[in-house]
Amino acid sequence: MTPSAAPAKSSFADAGAARRRLAAMLDGAELGQAIAAHPGDPETALAAFEEVMFRRSEAEAVAAHDTVELIFGAGAPDGLVKLLTPEH
């Protein structure tokens, strides 16, 4: 049996990649809508798109920051251990 040439990776990596692809498609669709809503005015279209995009991505940025703090912050590794330890 020949070993696989593909590197082993977790399902979390796959889920993250799929989520990024969906976000990119949504960004493209919303940018297209903004351009269509503001023909001949790309600056206004871009500003409208960015307002929606930044509002949507704010929660993701906060969650990412919280995760980094949990893993690498001043209380590490206790917060992560507590998160991953089942309660008895």
Image (tube, helix red, strand yellow):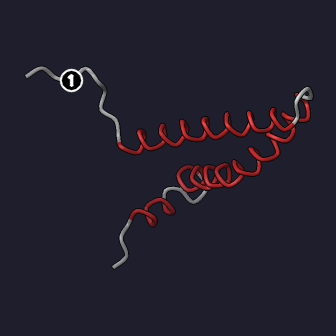
Residue in the picture at 48% in, 37% down = 17
- Compared with residue 68, is residue 28 higher up or lower down, i.e. above or below? above
Where residue 18 sits in the image (x, y, percent)? 47, 39
**Quarter the C terminus occupies:** bottom left
- Give the structural element (helix, strand or loop) at label 1: loop
Residue most extreme to the bottom: 88
Where residue 56 sits in the image (x, y, percent)? 71, 50
Callout 1 amino acid: Ser
Q: Quadrant of residue 87?
A: bottom left
Q: Quadrant of residue 45?
A: top right
Residue in the picture at 57% in, 53% down = 67
Q: Quadrant of residue 13?
A: top left
Q: Is residue 35 left or right of residue 79?
A: right
- Compared with residue 80, is residue 39 higher up or lower down, i.e. above or below? above
Q: Mark 1 highlights which residue?
A: 4
Q: Is residue 47 left or right of residue 59?
A: right
Please count the marks in the image.
Answer: 1
Question: Badge 1 local density, few (<14 within 10 Å), some, or many (20+)?
Answer: few
Where residue 23 sits in the image (x, y, percent)? 60, 41
Q: Is residue 75 left or right of residue 8?
A: right
Where residue 51 sits in the image (x, y, percent)? 82, 45
**Quarter the N terminus occupies:** top left
Residue in the picture at 52% in, 43% down = 19
- Compared with residue 31, is residue 56 higher up or lower down, i.e. above or below? below
